[in-house]
Amino acid sequence: MTRDLTHGIRSAPRRKAAAGPASEAGQAGDAATVAAVLARLADRDPDPKAGFDRTDPFRLLVTVLLSAQSTGPTVSRVAEALFAEVRDPAGMVALGEARIVEIIRPVGLGPSKARNIVKLSAALVADYGGGVPRSAAEMRRLPGIGRKSAEVTANFAFHEPVIAVDTHVFRVSNRIPLAPGPTVDAVADGLARSVPEGFKDNAHVWLFRHGRDICTARKPACPRCPVSDLCAWPGRSTA
């Protein structure tokens, strides 16, 4: 089975983070540090998107919408069930909210997500001929699609050089720091300025995995961190 693009993505809060810097605008990190960190992560995982199914932008978009406040494995199972019954936006509209709610119930927030799935599907049919717009900016005009969902989909499906910020990317970006900021938008804007173009296509996955596996919220594995010597976080441990 191909891997699902949500890979356990969790949303970071949009409110100000208690440990974050004061500037609402966010900051670009030190260019040399950012490049060095990403180069090391790239050496360890040169093809981080290998195995992800990126052939169907509509499915990617709906799957990311389903992932809010849910876990990767559950989202994958629900997406499989949903797309076993329907393949395109027109079919999703015809399927209707009630049936969609039944199918997606395990991911939580079923009524709200079903409503947005039908609305965005109708918008895709009416405004894009049943296709998915190629840019994150256009996707954000769709019902239920915020910045993270749009940027994940645009990056995975169309290789747009945008870096979606979830809770793991937010944490790593503030700790090292790569692009310190008190909000998701501030960090995303900082990463857009500080990450070299050559790293942007894969930066989200590298930073997500680093935050999930090494730079965890509690008891980060600093002794086995490949970028520990580049990290300025005061809470960094060596034992």
Image: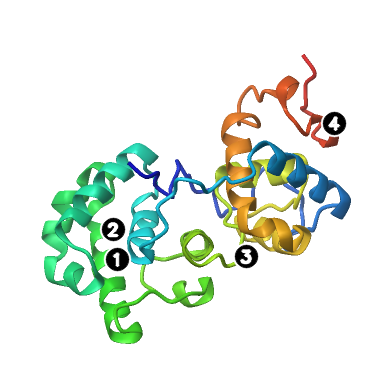
Q: Would residue 24 be seen by someone viewing this image from the given angle?
A: no
Mark 2 touches mark 3? (CB < 8 Å): no
Residue at screen point 40% across, 44% down: 3
Q: Nearer the viewer, mark 3 or mark 4?
A: 3
Q: How far is the residue under mark 4 from the one under mark 2? A: 43 Å
Mark 2 is on which residue type? Lys
Q: How far is the residue under mark 2 from the one under mark 1? A: 5 Å
Along the viewing direction, whichever of 119 and 33 lies nearer the viewer: 33
Vertical side of 145 occupied by 99: above or below:
above
Left or right, 215 with respect to 88, comes to right
Mark 3 touches mark 4? (CB < 8 Å): no
Residue 229: give its label. 4
Specify few, some or many for label 2: CA neighbours under 10 Å numbering under 14, 14-19, or 20 or more. Answer: many
Q: Earlier in the sequence, mark 1 or mark 4?
A: 1
Left or right, 212 with respect to 101, comes to right
Which element is circle 3 on? loop
Work out which residue is located at the far top of the displayed protein and give it.
239
Residue 161: give its label. 3
Q: Report which residue position mark 2 lands on.
A: 113
Which element is circle 4 on? helix
Mark 2 touches mark 1? (CB < 8 Å): yes
